[in-house]
Amino acid sequence: MKQELAQKLVQSLKDAGVNFVTYLPETRLSQIVPLMRDDREIDLIAVANESEAVTIAAGATLGGKQAAVYMENTGIFVSCYSLLTVGRQLGVPLLLVVAYLGGVADLRNSFLYATIGRHSIPVLDGLGIDHQVLVDGDKLETQIKDAMRAANSLRSPYALLFAGEFSE
Amino acid sequence: MIRYECLELLASKISDQLVVTSQSGQRIEWSHLSRHEGNLLVGMMGCAIGVATGLALALPHRKVIALDSDGSVLLSLFNLATLGNLQPKNLVVYVFDNGVYSGSRISYPTATSGNTDLASMARAAGIKNAQTIGAFEEFKKAGIEALGKSELGFFVCKVEESLLHREIPRPVTDLAENKYTFVRYLERTEKKTFPFVGRG
């Protein structure tokens, strides 16, 4: 991902009100990590497992923060239990910022990722988590604001899956 | 040591702290002992420490208490490494370790009834004040004193297996109802509006 796009992504998160982010780093969107780390308006929390990325972010939401979880799509599989029980059953809004490895629009797709990509959206559907695939930054600010508003309105996690330009 | 007695003492010390419980007998016992609006009775195993950590980070001026079990901690051991590095000073975790999966109704032993020592694991993960409490007098001292300290506390409370929670009424509060009571309590005491609440 180009640095300019990474900056736009972080700024769009902030413009959508996001001020608390839990994360486990990955390859596609990792440029956003140092940007968020250096930003005083975002509490950036490193975790050891995406399952706790979800529970910690959920706790922060219940404590009044506007929280996002940044993860690779493999993290969706790891965090299914937390997403279902805390995210869906308890009804806690979270913005899931997901690097969509192995999706059709993943410019670095390979046999390593294709199976993971193939199953990501069906798993989100199974969890009842609405989602959208983003492939360029043209309407990024609006799309992130819309997604955050949808998460808050649904009282549920909402997933944005980043591929295309974001996977360069 | 009997878990209910520990919880009874703890309940008498609650004022404006936030209390997060995981799913186990202690959730039932705590809901029976405490009607505090700052209770969040998380109805799943392995999630309470994470949710409590998020609350502690979001509200660093509030004391947050996690009530957990050996089975739940074993389900989410990654929490130890994360807590060991974050060190939220306003979080106290009580793990009521009865050495069995009592909810299974066959009391199948957990790893802590074998060779696993959760307090040692927590210390090795970086949680400095992690200790095992084996007697009620210790709980009264070290366990309760932690509420007044500005330090992450992690107390593995060795308790006897008790089936008391099967005899007392289970909480009737729906998860969503409990969540909103909790959030409204926070809105009131923090004097701010939370992003996802309201707008009807």
Image (tube, helix red, strand yellow):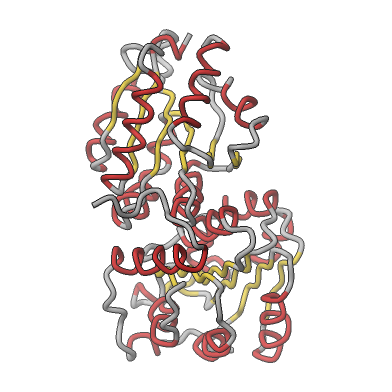
Residue B3 percent location from the top left of the image: 52, 85
For this orientation, the residue located farthest to the front is B191
Left or right, A25 with reference to B176:
right
> A108 or A4: nearer the eye?
A4
Q: Residue at x 40, y 37 (%)?
A: A95
Above or below, B170 relative to B137: above
Left or right, A137 with reference to B13:
left
Q: Residue at x 50, y 31 (%)?
A: A14
Picture mark count: 0
> B59 or B69: nearer the eye?
B59
Q: Residue at x 46, y 37 (%)?
A: A17
Q: Residue at x 23, y 42 (%)?
A: A128
Residue B21 percent location from the top left of the image: 46, 70
Quarter assignment of residue B120: bottom right
Residue B145 percent location from the top left of the image: 72, 80
> A29 or B185: nearer the eye?
B185
Q: Is residue B69 visible?
A: no
Q: Is residue B72 visible?
A: yes
Above or below, B75 relative to B64: above
The quadrant in which the N terminus of chain B is found is bottom right
